[in-house]
Amino acid sequence: MTMNAQLRWRKFVSNFMLTMTGVCALISVSVLFFILGYLVYHGGAAINWDFFTKLPAPVGENGGGMANAIVGSAKLLLLAACFGVPIGFFGAIYLAEFSSSKIAFVVRYAADLLNGVPSIVIGIFAYSLAVQPFKHFSTYAGGFALGVMMIPITLRSTEEFLLGVPRSLREGAMALGASKWKTIGTVIVPAAYRGILTAILLAFARVAGETAPLLFTALGNRFWSEGWNEPTASLPVMIYNYALSPFEDWHRQAWAAGLVLLALILIINIVARAILSRGISVPRA
Amino acid sequence: MAATSTTVPSAGPLAGSRSFFDRLRDGDEIARLITLLFAASVVLITLLIVYELWHGSVLPRHKFGFAFFRTSVWDPNFEQFGALPFIFGTLVTSAVALLIAVPLGIGAAIFLAELATARLSDALEFFIDLLAAVPSVIYGLLGIFIVVPVMRDVIQPALKNTLGFTPLFKGPAFGIGFLTAGVVLAIMVIPYIISVSREILLSVPRDQREAALALGSTRWESTWKVVVPFARTGIMGSIFLALARALGETMAVTMVIGNTPAIAASLFSPGDSIASVIANQFTEATGELYTQSLIELGLVLFLLTFILNGLARLLIVLTSQRGGAARA
Amino acid sequence: MKRIAAILLMTFGLAAFFVARAVLSINGAGASFPEPIYSKWFDEYHKKDPNVQINYQAIGSGGGIKQVTEGTVDFGASDGPMNDDQLKAFQDKHGFSVLHFPTVLGAAVPTYNIPGVTAELNFTPEALAGIFLAKITKWNDPAITAANQGVTLPGNDIVVVHRSDGSGTTYIWTDYLSKVSDEWKTKIGKNTSVNWPTGELGGNKNEGVAGLVKQTPNSIGYVELIYAIQNKMPYGRVKNSSGQFIKADLASVTEAAAGAAKNMPDDFRVSITNAPGKTAYPISSFTWLLIPSKFTDAAKRDAIKGFVKWMLADGQSHTEALAYSKLPKEVVSKELTALDKVQ
């Protein structure tokens, strides 16, 4: 009899605990929907044509928009990609195709280390390297900071996908007489291109929302940023400044900017994963 | 053309007989050198960061030495700088974050790995990954306008009424402070705990579970007493990863922590963290000692995350090796 | 692949188009105290002369001093004049000096949020010093209630909000407290960033402090006048050196500057806190633009000088709408002469 009672208790505990884990999962996932919900609710009403086309109004006046911040973020991301993607991409080719295991270990370790550096420290680094010596806050400096953050993600993911290309492809190419770099350019990279594209998109999404490094590099701008050597407004920094202010109108605009930023990031993430799940263009051996 | 332009591959019995310039004409050597350059620049950048942090903090390191970590005075006027309040704030908020995120995260990971069907598990993981992609400043935005009022008007008074006798929940409830920052951080690090723990749990060999079940354990018992302990080191690794992330978080923390260098027992108290004080004061630190003290704080943060990340990776690698070996 | 390349090229082309516009961009950074009037001015000046774009970022007076010394911005702005060490640091770094140009007069007011209290409170210097020194901890402390007969103040703890960043408003506030309280002077001192004894809430820039006070019951903070007005927050009267409780407004701030206007030093660095005068508001201050005395870029120099001239004339007509007091006439004429020093 006690055996049965014990068994029933254990079964009860089992069911209870497993239900609790389900609750944990539910809570964790629902946070995402809460965030989206609040942003849509508060920011949706604030998104209007003005938001996308006008410059910020003077302090305390209602109205204005974030046109310069949107363009500024786009310019920063473009620069970041120009700097970070080639380093990550070609560095990954070196690791996958040319390097010895010792050098590969050192480079991978450095990349992982770089990945773990807090973004505020990257900001300090970019300030000392790209702002102080040139005596100028600039879009270049901001792009540099973001680019540095893109490197590790691009490098590691690209390397993984390059290594995932089956040996049969490489050996086939070499058997046909292609030199190594030709093999890489015409066979291996195209075979892995889906994964590489995903890696770049994910790196983009990661740095699109970064604020801390931009505080010391791109600073901010109430007007259009001319060229690449001037400070520039960016969405994340605008959100930060407006959220901390006491002006209701600025709060409204911060929600709108948050919605736009998050929508952009989520779309990039979803697209990246969709590309990947379509399957690598060559079946794995 | 391809047949005639091919020459003997670089590595091989005849490799030594070709000069550098012959190999150069191949294109392979150029490709190798160019890509080596890019790979080397990764190492170079990383070294540069460490150098800039070290070199940029020389004044306070010589002036204060190790006392920097014991002093709690942060006085730009009289040029006395001590890191203790910020180290305290960073550790306290991270501890609160982990206390909340670890049970939730491991619970969710268990559900995803053990209970959910493959389709449900993948679908939920998809959403968890999206949660990890939300930028810090948006968490900060939600923190200020949603979490802070809720904390101030609902949760903190409730805690005060029930647990107010403990030193942890004393004092006025502002809504902003250590507790709120910890809660926001918890939401930010849960995805990392879930995705890594889920992977680790999934990699535990089936025979472990099946053996436990065959011996008459309930589902929960086999999970909690066999699978999870097996994956213990990997799960520890995921916790260290989450901790490293929490330590370095800047924007969300600075928007809700209160920005005042205070060391207090109460979680309701406002405080400051290393990342937050750097973000607030770096562009305005007048005077070399002030600026360099902030850089030294950056160095401390860098070292902390470096150690934690290293430990995390070590633990995760150890677990997967163990899982692989047991499978054999 | 080709399509991607084409898109990239077009983007670069568009980007280059941005470079090709011939607008002169000038960057300044510094105090948030005058940010409302500065942003209005630079907006108006851009409308008047679309070829000149003056981008001002309010990062705090400390930031203005630091970045103009570093040379990363073309001019700075601060409500706390640079001290001799900072002037020397600039001189050593650049080989020429940096000049102060007052722009407006403003006031730092004690703004508060006490549930159930809508009246205007009177603050004595002792009360203010005591609150910010954390000696006076409750709203119904006799030091506060004595000056506010007829108002029921609750026995709640006072939440003190200060600036967490390097701030000229902090400089003005601590300058005043140092003058009225010996204990403050020796223990804390005056600076853009100090070691606050209370260790209570810190807000980033004037906006941050206003935001915190607005949202936190039983709090008190110090902000520039316009921030309290724009956010419809109550702010108190302060007892001046003649014993009168004065509310900050255009007249009382102008009165505070009257004495200094007649005896303005050549470098314009002067403190007008606790100024004499029956109706003077005691926590008033000039705020300055920090302009280097030499420019390598002639176009920038001329644009900045053109702006300062405009600011001293037409610009002054915008100040009162935003609750900043105009500069006294003597100061204006002295500044126009001093402008020639900018080469």
Image: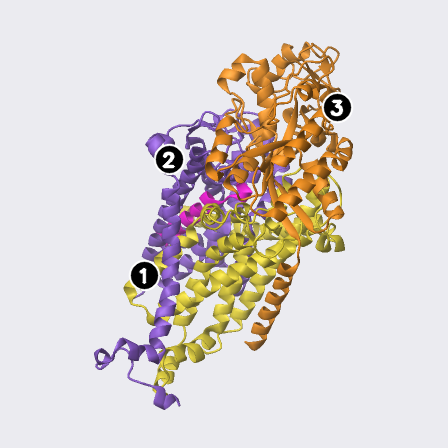
Chain colours: A yellow, B purple, C orange
Secondary structure of the residue carrying tag 3 is loop
- Residue B130: percent from the left, percent from the top? 55, 57
Please determine whether, in this image, residue B164 is positioned above or below residue B5.
Answer: above
Tag 3 residue: C249
Tag 2 residue: B59
Residue displayed at 66% across by 32% down:
C337
Tell me: C174 left or right of A191: right
- Residue B284: percent from the left, percent from the top? 52, 36
Q: Which residues are magenta?
A: B229-253
Check the picture and name the quadrant holding the C terminus of chain A.
Answer: bottom left
What kind of residue is marked 3? Asp
Q: Are marks 2 and 1 in contact (CB under 8 Å)?
A: no
Distance from label 2 to label 3 (Cα)? 45 Å
Residue displayed at 36% across by 90% down:
B3
Distance from label 2 to label 1 (Cα)? 35 Å
Q: On residue B183, which mark appears?
A: none
Image quadrant in which you'd find residue C294: top right
Secondary structure of the residue carrying tag 1 is helix
What kind of residue is marked 2? Leu
Mark in the foreground, 1 or 3: 3
Residue displayed at 48% across by 51% down:
A130
Q: Magenta stretch: residue B245 in it?
A: yes
Tell me whether marks 1 and 3 sit on the same chain. no
Tell me: C79 left or right of B17: right
Tell me whether marks 2 and 3 sit on the same chain. no
- Residue B302: percent from the left, percent from the top? 40, 45
Tag 1 residue: A105
- Residue B286 in view: no
What kind of residue is marked 1? Phe
Q: Are marks 2 and 3 in contact (CB under 8 Å)?
A: no
